[in-house]
Amino acid sequence: MLIAITGIDGSGKSTQIELLKKFLEKNKYSVAISKAYGKAEEFFLAPFFQYWDSLAITFIFQGLHRQQYISALKEIKNGKIVLADRWDETFLSFHSRFGFLAKHQKLREEWNKLAFESLIPDLTFFLDVPPKVASQRLISRGKNFLDEGDENYQKQIRKSMIKSLAGRPTVFIDGTKSINEIHKTIVSELSKKLKKPKINKN
Ligand code: ADP
């Protein structure tokens, strides 16, 4: 099973993924986290991004997305619940607005298919947070190398993400609620989809 948690930078994705992983493991589910890039990639890639061509960067990221798909698929086949920190909605939303692919819808969709092979999450949780709130959270947490966009950029990404999720099984959650309230909503929605072992709500 593939579960995605998505939203703009600072919406609380990693926080909820960690909580959900702990919860599921406590309830005897086997879980894997799926993320296309993190600290290791930041270390290697950040120095190049200042002067690399944007299309070259797109190729790199599409490689990372492809590997995310391959690794996630392996874990799904092993019977794990895969918790993805973003899936292809992020690729689609970013590239429908910015860079070379923004003007090439067909190419964008074909690249997306190449990387993710049309594998859509069984359920996506969209943590909806106003860009202003998310940006304040990022300042407190400390930004990473991709958390660069300003509020206007985040507004556009939020809109496109919602558009990219149309027609997919998605639960929209008010991400300004407390961490615990959001976690409870996620558990409650997910438990409708889960088979044995039964979830223990305590
Ligand atoms: P993301 O992975 O979406 O970029 P994080 O999970 O890293 O976001 O959260 C960004 C910051 O916001 C962290 O410092 C985290 O503790 C805080 N945070 C996450 N969820 C909430 C929430 N519901 N309310 C207040 N702060 C939150």
Image: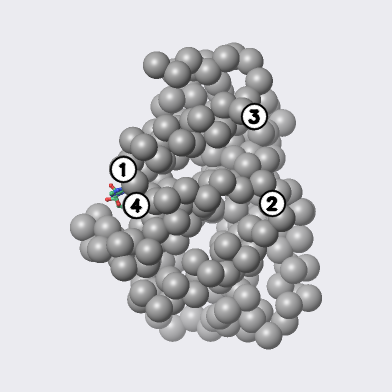
Task: Name the residue located 67 percent from the left edge and 40 percent from the top edge.
Answer: 122
Q: Is mark 4 within 8 Å of ligand 1?
A: yes
Task: Name the residue located 49 percent from the left edge and 36 percent from the top edge.
Answer: 186
Nearer-N-terminus badge (2/1) = 2
Amino acid type for the residue under numbered disc 4? Thr
User: On the picture, is 9 further left or further right than 137?
Assistant: right
User: On the picture, is 65 further left or further right than 8?
Assistant: right
The span from disc 3 to disc 1 (Cα, nearest Å) is 24 Å
Q: Are marks 2 and 1 in contact (CB under 8 Å)?
A: no
Secondary structure of the residue carrying tag 2 is loop
Q: Is mark 1 within 8 Å of ligand 1?
A: yes
Provide the residue designation for mark 2.
168
Which numbered dot is residue 193? 3
Secondary structure of the residue carrying tag 1 is loop
Task: Name the residue located 44 percent from the left edge and 83 percent from the top edge.
Answer: 51
Residue 184, image x, y percentages: 42, 32
Nearer-N-terminus badge (2/4) = 2
Secondary structure of the residue carrying tag 3 is loop
Residue 191, image x, y percentages: 57, 26
Which numbered dot is residue 176? 4
Amino acid type for the residue under numbered disc 3? Lys
For residue 37, above or below residue 122: below
The answer, for residue 51, to whether it is visible in the render is: yes
Please tell me which residue lies in front, 91 or 41: 91
Provide the residue designation for mark 1.
178
Which of the 4 image quadrants contains residue 136?
A: bottom left
